Image: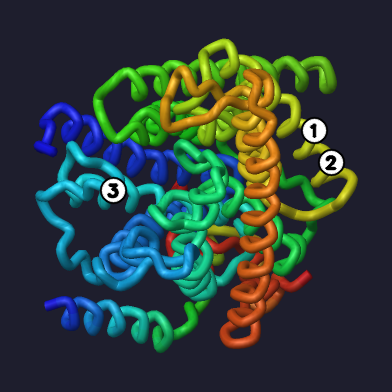
């Protein structure tokens, strides 16, 4: 098939939009931490863009999308991006250059480990963060991306649907974040000291830019400038809006004030929820998915922090883990094959099988991500140590790890 | 060329491992927590 310049332009623009999301995440997280840790938190997202971009080019891409080996990993066909050029990769995107598909996927690989950093914010040793991100992208992200998205991947063959990364991106990162928070332990003073966000304007800016970039994330996953992309764009916007409205409303009823932070986090929850479903559902289903994400994620934050007592510092599991699980299951409820011939009908449209497959996929990916992340973290802890010394944590990572301050006021 | 790329990236990874742990600078600590002296931060 011939290269289509419109499809190519859209996918390249989408890759740039997804790249922006990782930096938006830096602001989103940076505003939520205390002022002594804002640079260290933003650095996580900025550094990961550089780190995983090189990892992806050298071995990450080939492990995810190389010729299938046993249904769980790709071969070394594309090591160092050998053979990844201007010709299309017909298995995935027959109308754009292979290199355009590769760089679009690269940005997904970049943002996924960046999401996890919110769980260990304000206490993780920088060296441990670097090694963890590299190991996690190789040992968790690549096999899951291959299993769910690649030709021959066993979950793809099984029949699971994940349009833009509900399982590959959000469940893997959310579950791994929960494990990381448990292995690292609570921050010094957790439950005793006030740990309020130091700058919510950063957080709202980050949420707005995430919403913007998510159009590339979801609509770009159509891999063409077509009706499927347009539908994904619309449902993404609707679900984000419903997530924001719902979270803010629930928060207002429960706490008595219409929270700005609640609206921002709710939008992100709605975006997470619609991600796996974006190519398979209608706008009215997106309203239900956004509503569900707002409710489930809101109560997950409350439950995790207040009842369970896990210090997932920036609520990564509650938003990305729970939102991803809800979105994947909702795909099994609301998917319509009439919208996308590559999809299937969900439970509400006469197809109960899909729901079962979505639930099985959620369980398998969550367990794999949890176990693999736990092993990686324990090995790193034994070799170089996961946490900074208590003195450095109290002083803040900006000054003690990076020797720089965010504000000279 | 691919082998060279791997070697260059491997050199960076080695660099991260051998890089010294950060020294806490007194002047930066003063700017962060003016009332705190080094060695007093432990809780």
Mark before the other along the chain sequence, 1 or 3: 3
The percent coordinates of residue A158 (x first, y second) are 56, 49
Label 3 sits on a secondary structure element that is: loop
Q: Which residue is mark 3?
A: A91
The reply, left or right, for residue A317 in relation to residue A221 is: right
**Residue A252 appears in view:** yes
Do labels 2 and 1 touch, CB within 8 Å?
Answer: yes
Judge left or right: residue A164 versus residue A94.
Answer: right
Q: Position of residue A336 (x, y in %)?
A: 53, 21
Residue found at x 72% / y 68%: A183
What distance separates the C-alpha of mark 1 from that of mark 3? 41 Å
Which chain is indicated by disc 3?
Answer: A
Q: Which residue is mark 1?
A: A299
Q: Which is more toward the observer, A22 or A192?
A: A22
Label 1: few (<14), some or many (≥20) within 10 Å? some
In the rendered structure, which disc, 2 or 3, sits on the residue that comes first in sequence?
3
Distance from Cα at disc 2 to Cα at disc 1: 6 Å
């Amino acid at each position: 098939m011939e290269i289509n310049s419109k499809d190519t332009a859209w996918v390249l623009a989408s890759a740039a939009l997804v790249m922006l999301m990782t930096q938006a995440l830096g602001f989103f997280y940076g505003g939520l931490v205390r002022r002594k840790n804002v640079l260290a938190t933003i650095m996580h997202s900025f550094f990961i863009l550089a780190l995983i971009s090189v990892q992806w080019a050298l071995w990450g891409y080939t492990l995810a999308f190389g010729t299938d080996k046993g249904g769980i990993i790709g071969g070394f066909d594309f090591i160092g991006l050998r053979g990844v050029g201007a010709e299309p990769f017909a298995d995935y995107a027959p109308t754009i250059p292979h290199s355009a598909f590769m760089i679009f996927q690269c940005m997904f690989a970049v943002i996924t480990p960046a999401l996890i950093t919110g769980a260990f914010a304000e206490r993780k040793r920088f060296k441990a963060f670097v090694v963890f991100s590299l190991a996690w992208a190789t040992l968790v992200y690549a096999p899951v991306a291959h299993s769910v998205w690649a030709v021959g991947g066993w979950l793809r063959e099984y029949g699971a649907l994940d349009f833009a990364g509900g399982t590959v991106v959000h469940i893997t990162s959310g579950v791994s974040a929960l494990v990381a928070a448990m292995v690292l332990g609570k921050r010094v003073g957790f439950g005793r000291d006030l740990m309020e966000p130091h700058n919510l304007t950063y957080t709202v800016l980050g949420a707005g830019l995430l919403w913007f970039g998510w159009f590339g994330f979801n609509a770009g996953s159509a891999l063409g400038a077509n009706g499927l992309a347009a539908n994904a764009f619309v449902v993404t916007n609707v679900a984000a809006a419903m997530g924001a409205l719902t979270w803010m409303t629930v928060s207002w009823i429960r706490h008595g004030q219409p929270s700005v932070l609640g609206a921002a986090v709710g939008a992100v929850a709605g975006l997470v929820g619609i991600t796996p479903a974006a190519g398979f559902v209608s706008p009215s289903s997106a309203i239900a998915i956004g509503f569900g994400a707002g409710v489930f994620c809101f109560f997950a934050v409350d439950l995790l922090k207040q009842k369970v007592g896990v210090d997932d510092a920036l609520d990564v599991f509650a938003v990305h883990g729970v939102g991803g699980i809800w979105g994947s299951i909702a795909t099994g409820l609301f998917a319509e094959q009439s919208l996308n011939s590559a999809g299937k009908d969900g439970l509400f449209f006469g197809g109960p099988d899909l729901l079962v497959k979505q639930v099985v996929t959620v369980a398998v990916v969550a367990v794999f991500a949890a176990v693999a992340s736990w092993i990686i973290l324990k090995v790193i802890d034994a070799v170089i140590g996961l946490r900074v010394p208590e003195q450095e944590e109290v002083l803040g990572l900006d000054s003690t790890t990076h020797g720089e301050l965010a504000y000279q006021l | 060329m691919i082998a060279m790329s791997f070697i260059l990236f491997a050199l960076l990874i080695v660099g991260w491992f051998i890089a010294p742990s950060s020294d806490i600078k007194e002047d930066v600590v003063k700017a962060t927590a003016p009332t705190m002296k080094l060695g007093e931060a432990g809780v």
